Amino acid sequence: MSITFRGTPITLAGTPLAAGDKLPDFSVVANDLSVVTKADTQGLRVFLTVPSLDTPVCDLEVRAFNQKAGELPGVSIYVVSMDLPFAQARWCGAAGVSAVQPLSDYRNRDFGAATGTFINELALLTRAVFIVKADDTVAYAQYVPEVSTPPDYDEIYAKLAELA
């Protein structure tokens, strides 16, 4: 898998996920500084990984999923970044994002390692989308080839429609 950031190749740490894999255990931090683990997430879930909520492409992506969430009853959507929980909460409040739960991987870089999304050169997460079924099986995995571009929304939404 070849991923670039603004045209420059990057190195991802961790194990990439593919459809059919089990989502590994992880721990991340919620906006109230509580620890959230895989066991705390249930049902059909979408995990977005983004470099930083406070960038134009990430902003648009999370807003798009926040809007789409209304059409996806029973689907939990999470966005994971290296942003501090305080910054995530501030951004969500300013952006009116309430249907997507932000989670921070700043403390242990655990989610990045579990999903193969940690960018060694930047200490950020690459742009990726994972759809995970209730039994923790990955139903869909998209690693966006160029970090500064959005994911393929149509492909993701089609997969969600198929599973929901």
Image: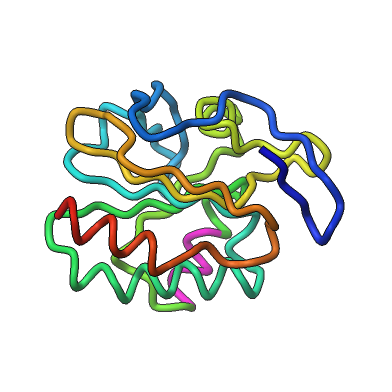
In the image, what residue occupies the spot 31% across and 64% down? 157
Asked whether, in this view, residue 139 is left or right of residue 53, the answer is left
Q: How many marks?
A: 0
Judging from the image, the colouring scheme is: rainbow
Name the spot of residue 52 as percent of width and height, x first. 63, 58
Is residue 111 one of those drawn in magenta?
Answer: no
- Residue 98 drawn at (x, y percent): 32, 68
Query: What secondary structure is the magenta-colored segment mainly?
Result: helix
Residue 104, how many percent across, how many down?
52, 44
In the image: residue 41, left or right of residue 141: left
Q: Which residues are magenta?
A: 88-94
Q: Quadrant of the C terminus?
A: bottom left
Q: Is residue 59 above or below residue 46?
A: below
> Where, by quadrant of the figure, is residue 160 drawn?
bottom left
Relative to residue 123, is residue 72 depicted above or below? below
Q: Residue at x 54, y 55 (%)?
A: 86
Residue 128 coordinates in the image, percent (x, y) = 53, 49
Side (left or right) of 153 relative to 2: left
Q: Residue at x 77, y 35 (%)?
A: 11
- Judge left or right: residue 33 versus residue 148: left
Q: Quadrant of the N terminus?
A: top right
Q: Which residue is situated farthest in the right direction here? A: 8
Q: Is residue 93 magenta?
A: yes
